[in-house]
Amino acid sequence: MEITNIQDKVQFLDGSFTKRVIYQDENIVSFVLNFKPGQELPYRALSGSTVVIDVHSGTGEIVGERRVIPITAGDIISVKGNENLGVRNTGSDSMTLYVNMAPRPSDTRYSQDIG
């Protein structure tokens, strides 16, 4: 068993969003995405994984294939692996998302820290 405090992974940079991996094994990867106001994760394919996102803090938008959906702290978003997804912080405060991807993508970029 492992216990990680999400606050230990909440780190922001001025130049871009950050990603901090919390846990990974052969089946799943879990991480946090941290966005300052105005920062975004560009629209992209999900690599065949199902993604579950917990909006830990802040407000923003999920950019889907057919719509843009406002999100706020406490929201849980589920996205099937055949969809594309983007995220942007539209609020005046920082935003943190807790993300689970399963199955874990074979592309190692999904299991590495960013920023």
Image (cartoon, helix red, strand yellow):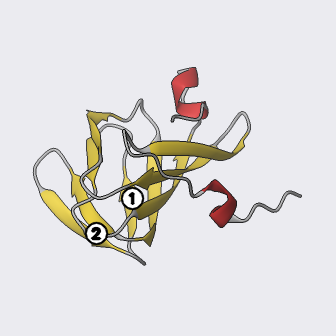
Instruction: Tell how many labels.
Output: 2
Looking at the rendered structure, the secondary structure element under dot 2 is strand
Look at the picture and state if 57 lies above or below 115: below
Q: CA distance from mark 1 to mark 2?
A: 12 Å
Question: Residue at the spot x=46%, y=56% of the render?
Answer: 52
Disc number lying in front (1 or 2) = 2
State the residue position of label 2: 71
Image-quadrant location for residue 21: top right
Tell me the crowding category of disc 2: few under 14, some 14 to 19, or many 20 or more residues within 10 angstroms, Cα based: many
Q: Going by the image, does 95 lie left or right of 110?
A: left
Q: Amino acid at mark 2?
A: Ile
Residue 19's spot in the image, x, y percent? 52, 43
Outermost residue, bottom direction?
A: 74
The quadrant of the picture occupied by the N terminus is bottom right
Question: Residue at the spot x=20%, y=49% of the render?
Answer: 64
Outermost residue, right direction?
A: 1
| Residue 78, numbered label | 1
Looking at the rendered structure, the secondary structure element under dot 1 is strand
Can residue 106 be seen by looking at this rendering? no
Which callout, 1 or 2, points at the residue further toward the start of the chain?
Answer: 2
Front residue (pair 14, 3) = 14
Q: Amino acid at mark 1?
A: Ser
Residue 54's spot in the image, x, y percent? 47, 65
Residue 16's spot in the image, x, y percent? 37, 40
Outermost residue, left direction?
A: 66
Image-quadrant location for residue 42: top left
Q: Is disc 1 in contact with disc 2, using a CB cutoff of under 8 Å?
A: no
Can residue 50 be seen by looking at this rendering? yes
Image-quadrant location for residue 60: bottom left
Front residue (pair 14, 2) = 14
Look at the picture and state if 9 lies above or below 54: above
